[in-house]
Amino acid sequence: NPIATPDISSCGPADLPPSANVLTCCPPPSNALPVDFTLPDATTLPLRTRPAAHSVTADYVAKFNAGIAAMKALPADDPRSFAAQASVHCAYCDGSYSPEGFPGVELQVHNSWLFFPFHRCYLYFFERILGSLIGDPSFAVPFWNWDAPDGMRMPAMYADPSSQLFDPRRDGRHAPPRLINLDYNGREPRFTDKQQVDHNLRVMYRQMVSLSPTPSLFFGSAYRAGDEPNQGPGPVENIPHGPVHIWCGDPNQPDGEDMGNFYSAGFDPLFYAHHANIDRMWSVWKGLDARSHTDLTDPDWLDASFLLYDETSKLVRIRATSVTVKRPVAVQRSKAEKASKEEVL
Ligand code: C2O
């Protein structure tokens, strides 16, 4: 059977590192039962196009700052607040929930086939909330284009200390212009810039192509109701997803905060740009081979469901199947669009 998030009221203590700087990860409770997700109609919620973070305009950056500021200004018990959104991620990664019907078993959205659909759903509602707070439902979060040479540095807008997008709990050595190392393991490689770019492109090819020939390999191990968590990540979740987190987090914090630890990652605005690119990798992978790179068809994957708040603070149950793209990727967008932008729901 598919994994289902239980009622939010069952959210329990998180399994946090001893020196964690939060006490709980439970999002604010809901006083109504969750409603099932339906695709909004395009007139009220237009199709949004995510831009590459390194290529946006100053106007875009100002708008994005205003949106994050608005989320940060909301009280933590407002489900749309930046703090509440960050704790949603923590609750789903640090054992605050048990799958519906399996009390005592940990629910974990990483290290299995839930990784891509959970984070797509999570980012989707984060984006709707942000857009509604700035009165622009067409606003889309940027993606950190670390798979392309021009995007292999921390995007400048996140590195500006006066920006809402800045987080002091990062590795200071990795501010721009330092190139990212996509399979970073805590040790600094001795590469020239040219070698680092080549190395990163090789890493991408290995994870997206060589190691990901079939859907079951790409998405990661099956994870069903009653299973123990952490059945096994797919290649992209493993690398570069994990190393990018570690590369950003501050090694002088006790647990690599913020980006370098599950519980705290969502507190760095950079998380959402990282995951917008992870989300993009899902559609890039499908576009690489329209015939064999398809979504999974296992009903236990398609019907896996998560509880997330929308921009009206309504609790929504959304299933993996709602965030799979049914149209063939090849006709979905033009080549030019494909190079610099990514369409989302
Ligand atoms: Cu939910 Cu990048 O982790």
Image: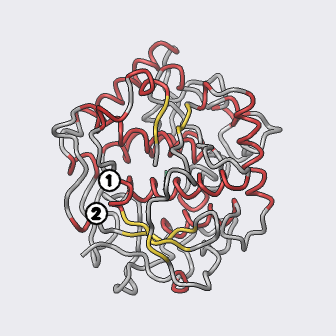
| Total numbered badges shown on the rendered structure | 2
Q: Is residue 328 above or below residue 80?
A: above
Q: Is residue 60 above or below residue 111?
A: above
Q: Secondary structure at mark 2?
A: helix
Residue that label 2 marks = 302
Q: Residues within 10 Å of mark 2 (few under 14, many from 20)?
A: some
**x then y, percent, for residue 316:** 50, 71
- Of the pair 150 and 69, the residue shown nearer to us: 69
Q: Is residue 33 above or below residue 294?
A: below
Residue 308 shows in the view: yes
Which residue is rendered at x = 41% and y = 27% of the image?
338
Q: Nearer the viewer, mark 1 or mark 2?
A: 2
- Report, in whole angstroms, how far the alpha carbon at label 1 lies from the one at label 2: 17 Å
- Residue furthest to the front in view is 43
Which residue is rendered at x = 57% and y = 66% of the image?
88
Answer whether labels 1 and 2 touch (C-beta < 8 Å).
Answer: no
Q: Which amino acid is tagged 2?
A: Leu
Residue that label 1 marks = 233
**Between discs 1 and 2, the one toward the N terminus:** 1
- Residue furthest to the right in view is 162
Q: Is residue 234 left or right of residue 95?
A: left
Asked if disc 1 is less than 8 Å from ligand 1, the answer is no
Which residue is rendered at x = 68% and y = 29% of the image?
156
Which residue is rendered at x = 46% and y = 35% of the image?
342
Residue 185 shows in the view: no
Q: Which amino acid is tagged 1?
A: Pro
Q: Quadrant of the N terminus?
A: bottom left
- Of the pair 27 and 67, the residue shown nearer to us: 67
